[in-house]
Amino acid sequence: MKKTDLKGIAELVGIAAIVASLVFVGLEIRQTQSALMASTYQARAFDAMTAQRGLADSEYIGPIFAKIDIDNHQSLQELNDEEFWRLQRFFLSRMIDFDNEYFQYQSGFLDDQYYEGQLRPGLIRNAKRWRSLGLTEFRPEFGELVDKLLAEDTPN
């Protein structure tokens, strides 16, 4: 065999090795992304369970919700200062949670089905409530989304 033939074979083997390693890296990235998405879903589920248990066990927030119609802005006047503050803190936590989930959606960790079926409707419902309590979004990008969704939801 000639020296040039060996060089060509070595180059071909090298190129094949590079292509194989790139395919392997691609598969590893896909597997890591799947694991990360599953972990994100599990973290959201645990967070939701913790929040619901907290509501069920709360001696403060439950009676506030029982006292008023949260969707009727006039009923907020029935709350004393402490109750109003507690309700604001509750919806502040909801706002932070929705902002976090929207950020995860933007980053590709939540799928379109979750966004359309869960995140979007819950965001519209809760944003009306936190805004009625005088709360506004921290991240401008999230605030723009809330403005857009609320404008779309407003009956003509």
Image: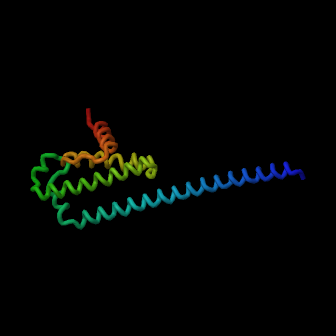
Picture residue at 14% right of the left edge, 55% below the top: 84
Give the image location of residue 74, x and y in percent: 12, 46
Spot the residue most to the front: 3
Q: Is residue 65 visible in the rendered structure shown here? A: no
- How far from the left and from the top, in percent, is residue 106? 42, 47
- The image quarter in which residue 124 lies: top left
Query: Which x, y percent locates residue 51?
Result: 29, 62
* Quadrant in the picture for the C terminus: top left
**Colour setup of the view:** rainbow
Direction from residue 28 to residue 125 in the image, left or right:
left
Between 20 and 47, the one lying in front of the other is: 20
Q: Quick check: 51 above or below 69?
A: below
| Residue 152 found in image quarter | top left
Q: How many marks?
A: 0
In the image, taking residue 41 as reference, residue 18 lies left or right, namely right
Q: Position of residue 141 (x, y in %)?
A: 34, 43
Q: Residue lying furthest top in this view?
A: 156
Residue sitting at the far right: 1
Q: Is residue 108 left or right of residue 125?
A: right
Q: Residue at x 47, y 56 (%)?
A: 37
Q: What residue is shown at x 13% (from left), y 49% (from top)?
A: 75
Is any atom of residue 113 visible in this view? yes
Which of 133 and 7 lies nearest the eye of the viewer? 7
Residue found 41% across the figure and 51% down from its top:
104
